[in-house]
Amino acid sequence: MTFSALQKLPKIGWRQKYQLRWKRRRLLWRSFRSRNQLTCLNDRTGKIRAGDVLAFTTLRNEMTRLSWFLRHYRQLGVRHFLVVDNGSDDGSAEYLLDQPDVSVWQTYSSYRGSRFGLDWLTWLQMRHGHAHWCLMVDADELLVYSHCDTRPLQDLTARLDQQGRVGFGALMLDLYPKGPLGRDTYDPDTDPTNLLCWFDAGPYRAERQSPIGNLRVQGGARERMFFAQTRQRSPTLNKIPLMRWSRRYAYVNSCHSALPRNLNAAYDGPGGAAPSGVLLHTKFLPEIVEKSKSEKERRQHFHDPSQFAAYYDGVINQPVMWTPQSVRYAGWKQLQQMGLMPGGDWGLQ
């Protein structure tokens, strides 16, 4: 694996600090206003207790993933899920309404126009997440970390509190099948990593971006397959998905970056010393081909959708992502040994 960890945020002047302060305030204000786009279908937030770890997500037509998604995060110790359903028509909203630890809001407003769901989730975090450790994850992301099979999130967050940390970063790792995309079948009640069990060990590269100071990691399987000629447009693979939330905070671009800018120091990459994990990205389940056809038409997932038509076409053509260099996924210990997340157990043994 090729990776260079960059641990210090770049210095900026007073003018940029002032501009970022106002940017954060604008983001919080637009998130506050976005509450009018949400209709509450089931509010169970009265069950939330002090110290609960909460999960926030926005989704559309994720019925295939929901069973395992909820199971995975319940096993990790999430106590309540706050979900924005963006006009699903596959039964996702109805399924979520039957779950005792899920509160559901629905909207038919533009996903792209809401900063790809960030405005809606930021409002819910402002309203319900203050002072809680909060996960922001997509339905196709499964967080793993050192000893996650035996130690819940409460142990991890307690250790982060002891160290004075407010965030926990992760590398997003694309998983894919051995055969052509869209050819297999998948049982929604089973672990998706049984089917999507291969990944690229590297190369990955990183750079700190100014003025916000966020780390940007690129590389891996999607770049190799779909962005080989336009690497600068390949997906950003780093996130800060777990944060001790404050109503002063705002994510800027998904949870790739945040304000105030010091929050971005929480992740210094898999080659760094800061505690971090891996988000197993299950995007390439068999439904990906049909979803790509739909999303290409909806044009909701990129700032400039026309630039990414070739990406959707590449997926629709059902390529084989596997190569002889692909690595079979074998759990968090393997990822740690490979350097994709740091060694050490942060007191979680």
Image (cartoon, grey):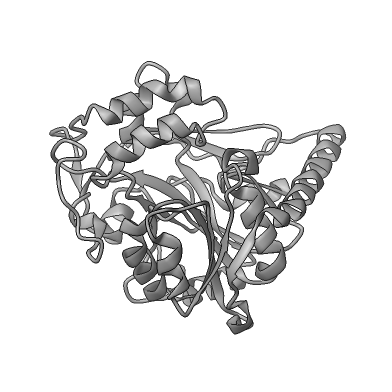
Question: What residue is shown at x 49% (from left), y 71% (from top)?
Answer: 156
Q: How many marks?
A: 0
Q: Is residue 17 left or right of residue 124?
A: right
Q: Measured along the vertical axis of the image, is residue 257 above or below residue 304?
A: below
As rendered, which of 143 and 41 lies closer to the eye? Answer: 41
In the rendered image, the residue lying farthest to the front is 89
Is residue 14 something one can see in this rendering? Answer: yes
Q: Is residue 349 visible?
A: no
The structure residue drawn at horizontal position 64% and vertical position 44%, both measured from the top left corner, is: 114
Residue at 48% in and 44% down = 238
Q: Is residue 31 left or right of residue 257?
A: right
Whether residue 74 sits left or right of residue 243 in the image: it is left
Considering depth in this image, is 334 or 305 the residue closer to the camera? 305
The spot of residue 279 in percent (x, y) is 40, 53
Q: Residue at x 32, y 65 (%)?
A: 68
For the N terminus, the image quarter is top left
Give the percent coordinates (x, y) of residue 149: 32, 72
Q: For the C terminus, give its image quadrant.
A: bottom left
Query: Residue 310: image x %, image y %?
Result: 37, 21
Which residue is the extreme one toward the top? Answer: 229
Residue 266 location, x and y as percent? Answer: 59, 53
